[in-house]
Image (cartoon, grey):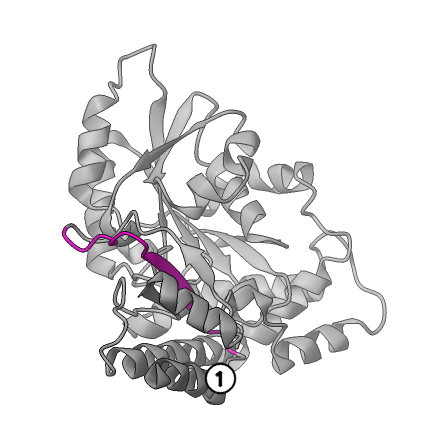
Amino acid sequence: MNFISDNLAGASTAVLQAMVAANDGLAAGYGTDAWTKRVEALFAELFEREVAVFLVASGTAANALALASLVRPWGAVLTHHESHVADDECGAPEFFADGAKIVGLPGAGNKLAPEAVARQLARMRPDSLHQVQPQALSITQATECGLVYRPDEVAALKAAIAPRGLKLHMDGARFANAVARLRCTPAETTWKAGVDVLSFGGTKNGAFAAEAVVFFDPAAAAETAWRRKRAGHTLSKGRVLGAQFEGLLANGHWLDLARHANAMADRLARGIAAQGKLRLAWPCEANEVFLVLSDAWRERLKARGVQYLAWSGAALPDGQGLAPGETVGRFVCSFATQAEEVERLVAIVAEA
């Protein structure tokens, strides 16, 4: 019963078959191969417009290169203070943006509110030589607490930053899970709501190691090819990345995988909530379930071989903080999670 992360699962059968097929024969290198070209066309079709797409092998690279393309060294990226960009990239966004500053903001459930963004912008004077200049806002879809931004929420954030000319970046490591939950089109929750650049996640959703940086204004990507090469993510055998995305995007496979992961998380959240023994830290809106656990519950789950991650409770809603001895546990479902695993965990909680 391993619920540690969705990136522990391997690749889906369709993605593996696409990779095997791409292995035969010779192919052009450095992203000029036929697979990558077809995937670029698939992304344009998916988002209903011309886009510039750059395939990379990790989410860290996708976020760092996306943000480096949006900000200058004296610039700043506003984001939630517990976002992956701020907390889990080992300084890569700042490094590849030549020292641009990450400015962290609070928000329940790791969601940013337009009011919080506006307050921060008001403190950053556009005419001050002594302050970094805000140039981008980065949001995570779904957030690190498993919550999903609705298109109108994304649009409201864009409206808050528009007067200062900031660009909007979306870290979409679990973008597929969010789209599957929202039941809207990828376009409706990105560029139509004001997103300028998307880090499109594949690795957590059935790819082996493949992410994409998607620019909704191709002109804004003028430097990105060189930045990707400089970062070591222009693979000589680029068809390895292209083939993964071709297998993932074909016939809506990426959304089928995300729907399954979401359904397993729903099943887990419903089964545990119905018993009234543990409470959810946040609603289950994607493929993650966050449970508030006492010391006794942690020991009980450990003894039964249940694996999960301890998580921060700093973004819990006001008035719903942790009692002494309590922590939050994160339980993630993937495309490979089986209903039997979920039911075993639900049964363990029921037996206590």
Does the magenta segment cover residue 193?
A: no
- What range of the chain is rendered magenta? 319-335
**Residue 133 at x, y percent in the picture:** 34, 23
The residue drawn where x is 71% and y is 57% is 238
The residue drawn where x is 63% and y is 73% is 11
Does the magenta segment cover residue 320?
A: yes
Question: If the image is split into quadrants, where does the C terminus sit?
Answer: bottom left
**Residue 212 at x, y percent in the picture:** 54, 56
Q: What element carries label 1?
A: helix
**Residue 299 at x, y percent in the picture:** 44, 67
Closer to the camera, 99 or 218?
A: 99
**The quadrant where residue 123 appears:** top left
**Residue 349 at x, y percent in the picture:** 36, 80
Query: In the rendered image, which residue does mark 1 sit on?
Result: 341
Identify which amino acid the numbered label 1 is placed on.
Glu
**The quadrant where residue 102 appears:** top left
Determine if residue 54 is in view. Answer: no
Using the image, determine if residue 309 lies above or below residue 221. below
Local packing at callout 1 (Cα closer than 10 Å; few below 14, some 14-19, many 20+) is some
